[in-house]
Amino acid sequence: MKFAYDDQNIFARILRGEIPNKTVYENDHALAFQDINPQAPVHVLVIPKGPYMSLDHFARDASPDEQLGFMQAVAEVCRISDLDDGFRAIANARAHGVQEVPHYHMHILGGRPLGRMLQG
Ligand code: 5GP
């Protein structure tokens, strides 16, 4: 990996309890919380507790237990958030993906029709 994990990023600080968050769900390997600037009625961020920068970094280097814990958190967020009518999961990565926070996170968006996947 060309980049190094920055342990001062905002989600690392949330994981250390230095910044408050509105937690939706937590297990040993993942934390899910409300996005501070929601783009839909449901906008939850699911993050691993380990120091992974992006989806590809997590998929390559996280242990099977970490990956399972993360996906179980995604499932719980969908169940808790009443997303039977559907949702979108987004994982932005690096510059072309316009990733602002360099700690892997999956956006779970829903609660209304979300339109087409990409604009522009
Ligand atoms: P990205 O562009 O990196 O995929 O998305 C980062 C997300 O983190 C944005 O949707 C932004 O609103 C959210 N965010 C940034 N800072 C904070 C924060 O301090 N607390 C919470 N809950 N969300 C944040």
Image (cartoon, grey):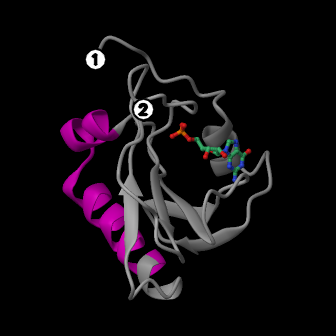
Residue lying at 42% horizontally and 32% vertically, measured from the top left? 53
Secondary structure at numbered mark 1: loop
Instruction: State the residue in front, 31 or 108.
Output: 108
> Where does the N terminus fall, quadrant-wise?
top left
Amino acid at pointer 1: Met
Q: Position of residue 59 (x, y in %)?
A: 22, 43
Give the structural element (helix, strand or loop) at label 2. Answer: loop
Residue 53, numbered circle: 2
Boundaries of the magenta span: 55-77
Left or right of residue 68: residue 31: right
Q: Main secondary structure of the magenta part?
A: helix
Residue 2, x across and y down, in percent = 32, 11
Q: Which residue is mark 1?
A: 1
Find out whether the residues at labels 1 and 2 contact each other: C-beta distance under 8 Å.
yes
Q: Earlier in the sequence, mark 1 or mark 2?
A: 1
Nearest to the observer: residue 3 or residue 51: 3
Q: Is residue 117 left or right of residue 98?
A: left
Q: Measuring 74% from the left and 59% from the top, which residue is drawn there? A: 21
Near mark 1 (Cα within 10 A), the count class, few <14, some 14-19 or many ≥20, is few
Figure quadrant, ligand 1: top right
Which amino acid, mark 2?
Met
Where's residue 118, x and y in %?
Answer: 37, 44
